[in-house]
Image (spheres, rainbow, N blue to C red):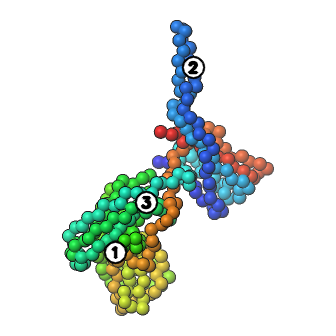
Amino acid sequence: MPETFPLTLPSGRPAIWTPADQIEEWAGIVDRHPSGAASARARRSRAKRRFACEMGALLEQDADYLAGFLSDHKEAGEAAFYITWPAYRVPSPWIAPTLGQVAGGALGARTYFVKYTWADATTLESRASQEASLAVDANKYLTVSVRSWPRGADHVNLYVGTATGVLYYSGRMSTSDETWTEDSASTTVDDTSAAGQKILWVASVADAQVGNVMRIGAGTGRQEDGIIDTIDADHFHLKANLTYEHTLLQADVVETKMGLSTQAVPPTANTLSEPILVRFLPDVSLPVIAGDIRRLRLEVEEDLP
């Protein structure tokens, strides 16, 4: 399976791709037949776009890293790999999410307002969709569905609130075409969870979901909010370190909350880029000058539809 070209080199500098030129499909070869007739055929089977990555004064560690990537893939006969070009933004979703409700929980009647974004495995994210709203009945959970994900999206971030335009991060969808369902997961701290680390030991992980916002120690001097990154049999691994220590003796309540103002609001800029499948040009090499790689110009091609 094609890999992604290293976006960041060991020195921390990014490998930035820019469009070099576009090679269009054209009828460039003329065949002349014995009858005297002539016919033209395409010089290339399809149009191509060429990209170039140019860097100068490379550090030795960066040069070694790039040389290893290129040589390993060429030796293995793997000519294709992915690059991320910032100009290839994944279009932000426009259509509002589809909202519904299913039986469950003991929450009272309330109205939710919801938007969603596309996001990748790092921190890149699109702008938010149009807003949808739904009056959810008592003893029912909100459900959210979105259209099929575009290439480049790793998950969907959900922004929820109880007033139009006042939305905060409240959860995520991790699988395309799934329907996300609100929950009311509630448990207590089951062992000492120290400040400054991400492990939160709990009595039960039932009903909790990755991406949930959990309020810990509500109403106490230790109240704080955390987002679940992963779930194990007896603890949550949070995205950020705990601010306070939570102990078994205190037995702080841990419960799912949506629309908390402590969380992020929908982004106003689209930073999510689409990965592009490209292939090496035949003469790919790393120019070496006096034992040091001074400048790299790596060119690749993408087949256009």
- How far across and down, in percent of the image, does residue 208 sit? 32, 73
Q: Earlier in the sequence, mark 1 or mark 3?
A: 3
Report the mark closest to the observer, 1 or 3: 1
Q: Which residue is mark 1?
A: 162
In the image, is 292 to the left or to the right of 137? right
- At label 3, counting other C-alpha atoms closer than 10 Å, the crowd grade (few under 14, some 14-19, many 20 or more) is many
- How far across and down, in percent of the image, does residue 214 sit? 37, 78
- How far across and down, in percent of the image, does residue 124 sit? 50, 62
| Distance from the alpha carbon under mark 1 to that under mark 3 | 22 Å
> Residue at 66% of width from left, 57% of height from top?
62
Q: Which residue is mark 2?
A: 30
Q: Give amino acid for label 3.
A: Trp
Asked if residue 232 can be seen in this view, the reply is no
Q: Which residue is mark 3?
A: 118
Residue 243 or residue 101, whichever sits in front: 101
Tell me the element at label 3.
strand
Q: Earlier in the sequence, mark 3 or mark 2?
A: 2
- How far across and down, in percent of the image, does residue 230 sit? 40, 70
Tell me the element at label 2.
strand
Asked if residue 281 can be seen in this view, the reply is yes
In the image, is 12 to the left or to the right of 278? right
Q: Earlier in the sequence, mark 1 or mark 2?
A: 2
Query: Could you say which disc has been placed on residue 277 in the image?
Result: none
Q: Give amino acid for label 2.
A: Val
